[in-house]
Amino acid sequence: MHEHVKIALEVHGLTKRFTKNEGFRWPWRRRDNGRRTIVAVDHVDFQVRRGEIFGILGPNGSGKSTLVRCIATLLIPDEGTITVFGHDVLREEMAVKRLINRVSVEASFFKKLTPMENLLYGARLYGLGAKEARQRILEILTRLGLKREDAFRPMEEMSRGMQQKVAIARAFLTQPILLLLDEPTTGLDPRSKREVQTFIRELRDTHDATILLTTHDMQEADALCDRVAILDEGRIVALDTPQGLKAQVARADDGEVTLEDVFMELTGKRLREEETE
């Protein structure tokens, strides 16, 4: 499907603003008719090629999640255009929804139900047969490191890491050709993080999936992404391969350059979040 299209995602001039009250503090607020206006995404341009793992790297508050929600048709941009495999997200919303799925850091479920029940519910919404869906659910959960019996335990008894794996399974169950992963490994233990990262590579390598990944984990972006856009205060300040970005920066002590060094060089800030183990 869509074999002739080389660009999976194109974002052009994307801008999204939110209005907040006067007491709200934000690093890049602007006045608009006397009100405080947050420019969460500020004239962003980029393309994602088919089959690419494309990273958006930035701290919390940089606009990553707002950007993903606009692509996922959950927010309406104030300016600019977004096309997914040639389909405009505003004019052809239903066509776009059939091509994408999204995993966010705050995945929601029916917590009293099991992963199998949650995922079968999702499968029915997409018109998948129960027998086919059940087999696919068990295959995906196994690849993500869950045991068969875990599929039949209530979600409320599972760790956050296990719940996040179920969220990724739910997103991939519909076999989207563009998968939007919004900080999918934040808060996971090191083993779960590795399992999820391995599965992300597998999706791209064996299932022809194109993946947009947001993260504030420099090592994750370096290890997984073909190209990385660095987002700061709603703007893309650099876009290149991880190696290309690191080649732009030289360390005074001649040590190995990291994406953290690149971010500090370009923004004068640190990626402040600490990983939760």
Image: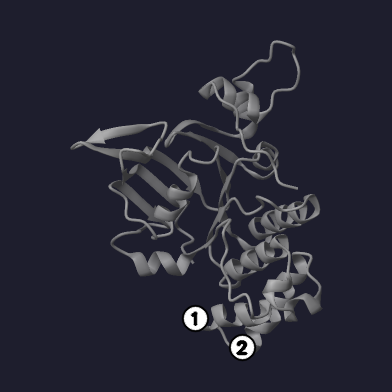
Instruction: Identify whether 145 is placed above or below 187.
Output: below
Q: Which mark is residue 249?
A: none
Mark-to-mark CA distance, 1 and 2: 11 Å
Instruction: Identify whether 151 is placed above or below 182.
Output: below
For the view shown, which residue lies furthest in the top direction?
252
Within 10 angstroms of label 2, few (less than 14), some, or many (20 or more) residues? few
The mark nearer the N terminus, 1 or 2, is 1
Residue at 63% over, 82% down: 117
- Name the secondary structure under disc 2: helix
Q: Position of residue 174 (x, y in %)?
A: 56, 72
Residue at 60% over, 72% down: 173
Residue at numbered disc 1 = 125
Residue at numbered disc 2 = 130
Q: Position of residue 134 (x, y in %)?
A: 67, 83
Q: Which amino acid type corresponds to the residue marked 1 in the rendered image?
A: Leu
Q: Quadrant of residue 205?
A: bottom right
Instruction: Identify whether 81 is placed above or below 230.
Output: below
Depth check, front residue: 196 or 61: 61
Q: Are marks 1 and 2 in contact (CB under 8 Å)?
A: no
- Name the secondary structure under disc 1: helix
Q: Which amino acid type corresponds to the residue marked 2 in the rendered image?
A: Ala
